[in-house]
Every structure is written in structure tokens, then in C-alpha cells.
Image (cartoon, helix red, strand yellow):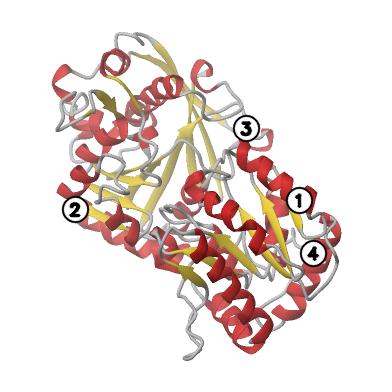
Amino acid sequence: MKKILFAASECVPFMKTGGLADVVGALPKEFDKNEWDVRVVMPNYRGIPEEYRNNFEYVTHFYMGVGPYIPNVHVGIMKYVYNGITYYFIDNLDYFGAWEPYSDTRTDVERFTFFCKAVLSILPVIDFRPDLIHCHDWQTGLIPVYLKTEFAANPFFWGIKTIMTIHNLRFQGVWDIKTMRGLSGLPDELFTPDKLEFKKDANMLKGGIVYSDFITTVSNTYAQEIQTAYYGEGLDGLLSARNQSLFGIVNGVDYALYDPANDAKIYRNYTERDHKEGKAANKAELQKQLGLEVNPNKYMIGLISRLTDQKGLDLVRYAMDKIIDDNTQVVVIGTGDPAYEEMFRYYAWCNSDKVSANILYSDDLAHKLYAAADSFLMPSLFEPCGLTQIIAFHYGTIPIVRETGGLKDTVIPLNEFEDTGDGFSFSNYNGEELINTVNYSKYIYFEQPELWNHMVARAMEKDLSWGVSKKRYEELYNTLIGR
């Protein structure tokens, strides 16, 4: 039996702020349980829903020193088996007693330094020695560092391999070196430019990249992009140096959660065979719910996103007046930068029958929009993978994307002359290109309905489930652990 431990700061269904949680929640379930023993460890946040917390099993607790600033701290271990996967929860009310997983950078750097050391420290206690630890994002970046330094003298840890997965390179866990030495207890010689030092500070993600055996990120194009100065967030040189150990694997989506044929959150279920009737029924009901004009002939564009510059919303701001017209409706779901929140509220106020601004995150409403919209807008500045376009495909909703990262890897632009493709895309980060691409999608929708329906059929047939990506991870795991 091959043993894998996933370590992450969030995981569906226990805690979610973004796509990281979806990955950590879905991928472990895909492996053959006769061959793989895959377990997950994460913090025991107070905000984990009671329906799960009430079933947690107390394992044990002990006290651990992390560094001079954290000399003796409580480490509790809770356990829960859910959908056949064993989950461990690191319990410490001082660090994880909040309802939300993240706070200010200084607080997060301390709590996740503790988490990294606790993950390794609990393994002999729970009698689980993984062949490989799969670390996700900067919050787990010190696990490979500790494993190959402080824990290297203990035979229990000899031979354990690590993979560091970068979900978004922009977030790295950076703080000053003096504080990081005091928090982590790591020796001075690790805080050098070839290890953890980064622009005279300490960088937790950089530590994970330097000390892990393999590095992955969540699309092949993003793996190439982050080796360049434009996308590399200051780590492009290091990533280029490690390019032989860097792999891009597109995220999948859990079709058990996102399936229009069985989705209890949408108004009417449908399949590829009756998608026209199904999507029309969902559109009419959503128009009614949101106070938009109820009209089956409106072209509905959906946007579900964190409202930040990364998502290309400055392009949307430039293009919005030209996107909205008498034949088009725009539905937005998301929160983020107050300037973008107010922008969408303004357009909804001015165009109440054409624009709906839902400044919140509602999973229920998101499912309804996937089923109702004709297209989905994702003009991102950069996008490591993107899940929205992958989910949209399965609901027969056509993505309109900028060609970057996972968007480029997953969306095949329409070629109307050969009747191929399953989306619309543009290459340059430019507002006029966005307008032209949206207008082209409208032309196909209104003037070439047969072509549009062929696109929808291809989109719904597309297999971007975790079953495909899992095979790539199995290959990497087997390469590292030598079986």
C-alpha cells in the first residue's frame, strides 16, 4: 500500500475560500483505495461546520517547541473519516480558533509555521508514515524545509518525499528574517539567497520550492509562464533553475458536485440531449429571481469571481458600456475590491433589467448561474488554472477567456469554418480585444445558432474530471517513491 499525505490550509467540505479547497477535497477521493492510502491534514478551525465538527474523534495532544518565539505550544489531533478518506485536524485555539482561515500576513506566517512543524510532529504519534507528503501553497512551504533539516536526524522520516503544488504564485508567505528565525527555529544558514531569503526577507513558499523533490502547478501553460519575469513574482529564476522538476497538471472538477443532470441546486435538470430546453428553463427562473427582464432571447453572460485586478476586471470596467445592450444581460457573483463591487452595483442600478450585481458568495446561486447563463466571462490577467470555465463546460455554458494559464490549456477557441472549438478567447491584455471577442460570441449566438449548439454539445462532452488529472499525479508519485 502506497501512503500519501495531503497537507493544506483548507479543504472542501470543511473550509473553503477558493479553488485550493476544491482540489484538496476532490483529488484524494480519486485514487484506488486498494493501492493508495491517501489521507489529509489541515487546521481545526472553529469555523468548520458543526455537522462535521460534532463527529470529530479526539486522538491525543502533546506540547511542542517551534522556535524561540513559540517555545511550548499545544498540538491537539482530531480525526474524522469522511467519504472513505481519513482527515486529521491540527487543534490549537490560539492559532485556529477563528471562524475564517486567514488573517493579516504576520499572524498567518506564525500560525502556518506552527502548522508545518505540527504536521511532521504528529506522524509518529498517529502511526502513519507517508511515502510522500503533498504540500499545497505557501501555508505548507516549510514542511519540506523542516523534513530535510530539523527532522532529518530521526530515522522515522528518512526517505519521505515531498511535492510542492503552487496554486497561485502571487501569495508566498513573506516576512522579515529575524521574525521568521524566531518563529521557526530554523538555523541562520537557511536564510540565504539560495534557500529561504527573498529580497532580504524570508519566504515560506520559496523554502518549499527549494527543498521539495518535485514542484507542480495547476496547468501546463502556467508552469511555463511562471518561469518568466512577467508572471514569476520574483521567483522566476528559481523556477527556471528547477524546471526539470516542475510539472503542470490541470485541475479537474468533481462531477458529483457539478452535474446538470443531478444538480439539486438548479431549477431544472438537463443533459446534453435536452440542454436547449433545460438551459432556457433555468434562464427564465433566474431572470425572475434576480429581477431581470424575463426573456428567453436575451444573451446572458455570467461572471463568478473574486473581484480583483487578477481577474481582468479593469478590462471589464473599460468594456462594460459596450457589453451591455438591449439583447444582453450580465449577472455577477463575487466579492473583493470595493471599487469593483461599487462598479457592478452602479451598472446594476443604471440597468436594473439588464445587470444583476450579487456582491456576495453563494454556492446555491452560483450553481443556478452555471445552468442559466449562455456564456461565462474570464478575461484574467493571469490564471493558474481556473475552475469556473471547467465547471461551465459541463453545464453547456461557453467560456470567454483570455489566453493565459489554465484558461489557455482548457478552452479551445471556436473555428467556425471547421466547426471546432468550445469557447472564445483573445490573447492580448486589451479592452478592445475583450469587446471584440464578446461581440463575436454574440454574433455566433444570435446569427449562427447551429454552430452555437454544436459548441455546447462539445463543451458538455468534454472530460475535465479528476480522473484524468489523477493519472498524472500517480505517475509523479510512483516516480518519486520508486514503485
**Spatial CA span between label 2 and label 4:** 47 Å
- Under circle 3, the secondary element is helix
Tell me, yes or no, if residue 213 can be seen here.
no
The residue under label 1 is 348
Tell me, yes or no, if residue 431 can be seen here.
yes
> Which numbered disc, 1 or 3, marks the residue that appears first in the sequence?
3
Say left or right for 145 vs 38: left
**Numbered tag placed on residue 237 in the rendering:** none
Disc 3 marks a residue whose amino acid type is Arg
**Spatial CA span between label 3 and label 4:** 31 Å
Residue 235, compared with residue 432, is above or below; it is above
Disc 2 marks a residue whose amino acid type is Asn
Q: Position of residue 446 (x, y in %)?
A: 68, 81
> Which numbered disc, 3 or 4, marks the residue that appears first in the sequence?
3
Say left or right for 77 vs 100: left
| Mark closer to the observer (1, 4) | 1
**Numbered tag placed on residue 267 in the rendering:** 4
Image quadrant assignment for residue 288: bottom right
- Under circle 2, the secondary element is helix
The residue under label 3 is 53
> Which numbered disc, 3 or 2, marks the residue that appears first in the sequence?
3
The residue under label 2 is 243
Q: In this view of the protein, which residue sits in the foreground, 188 or 425?
A: 425
| Mark closer to the observer (3, 4) | 4
Q: Position of residue 316 (x, y in %)?
A: 58, 55
- Under circle 1, the secondary element is helix
